[in-house]
């Protein structure tokens, strides 16, 4: 956690999450990051054939009170994305994971773009995930997603890992 906060301080160029100097936290030889990298790769390999030639990139996301992340996709950064919540809102731990709430991470059905027509009885297909410490979420990078506003005094900390497969 201290390394992630220090890295964020050194690479942040503004208040928004995307205002930062590009860097890959998995390039650091830090035991906790190496362990997290191994866990993420093991999970990804259990679900997908990554082959032997792929790129792995990771960065920290630090959220402060009332910050949120707009709807976006990570398909330029990778093919598979893993998001690990290092420090999440403490009150989320007692609540069910699949609901909206403080800093909820929301995956949106990629077959239905935001703002597209839907019938009155047709639900908007979103899958909310309430962050908690130690939760790891994996999804295809083309899946639209966003994060609801965070409310809290201590910074919320996450690590995002993008895996880009080699094209043959």
Image: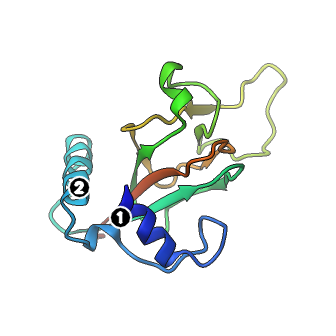
- Observer-side mark, 2 or 1, equals 1
Give the residue at the far left of this rendering: 52
| Position in image of residue 107 (x %, y %) | 56, 40
Give the residue at the far right of this rendering: 120
> Can you identify the residue that label 1 sits on?
3
**Quadrant hosting residue 124:** top right
Q: Of helix, strand and loop, which one carries label 1?
A: helix
Badge 1: few (under 14), some or many (20 or more) residues near its Cα, within 10 Å? some
Q: Residue at x 25, y 72 (%)?
A: 28
In-image side of 153 versus 23 (left or right): right
Above or below, 45 relative to 14? above
Q: Quadrant of the N terminus?
A: bottom left
> Can you identify the residue that label 2 sits on?
32
Between 161 and 10, the one lying in front of the other is 10
Badge 2: few (under 14), some or many (20 or more) residues near its Cα, within 10 Å? few
State yes or no: discs 2 and 1 in contact (Cβ < 8 Å): yes
| Position in image of residue 77 (x %, y %) | 45, 67
Q: Quadrant of the C terminus?
A: bottom left
**Residue 112 appears in the figure:** yes
Between 165 and 56, the one lying in front of the other is 56
Please give the label number shown on residue 57: none
Above or below, 152 relative to 130? below
Q: Residue at x 47, y 77 (%)?
A: 10
Above or below, 158 relative to 16? above
| Position in image of residue 132 (x %, y %) | 46, 34
| Position in image of residue 105 (x %, y %) | 57, 41
Report the Cα–Cα distance between label 2 and label 1.
10 Å
In-image side of 71 versus 136 (left or right): right
Q: Residue at x 64, y 35 (%)?
A: 102
In-image side of 120 versus 106 (left or right): right
């Amino acid at each position: 956690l201290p390394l992630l906060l220090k890295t964020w301080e050194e690479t942040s160029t503004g208040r928004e999450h995307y205002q930062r100097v590009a860097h890959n936290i998995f390039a650091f030889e830090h035991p906790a990051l190496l362990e997290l990298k191994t866990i993420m790769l093991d999970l990804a390999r259990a679900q997908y054939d990554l082959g032997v030639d792929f790129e792995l990139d990771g960065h920290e996301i630090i959220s402060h009170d009332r910050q949120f992340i707009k709807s976006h996709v990570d398909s330029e950064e990778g093919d598979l994305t893993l998001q690990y919540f290092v420090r999440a809102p403490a009150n989320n731990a007692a609540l069910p994971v699949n609901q909206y709430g403080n800093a909820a991470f929301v995956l949106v059905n990629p077959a239905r773009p935001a703002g597209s027509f839907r019938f009155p009885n047709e639900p908007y297909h979103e899958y909310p995930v309430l962050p908690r410490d130690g939760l790891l979420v994996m999804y295809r990078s083309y899946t639209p997603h966003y994060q609801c506003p965070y409310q809290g005094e201590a910074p919320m900390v996450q690590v995002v890992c993008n895996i880009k497969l080699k094209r043959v």
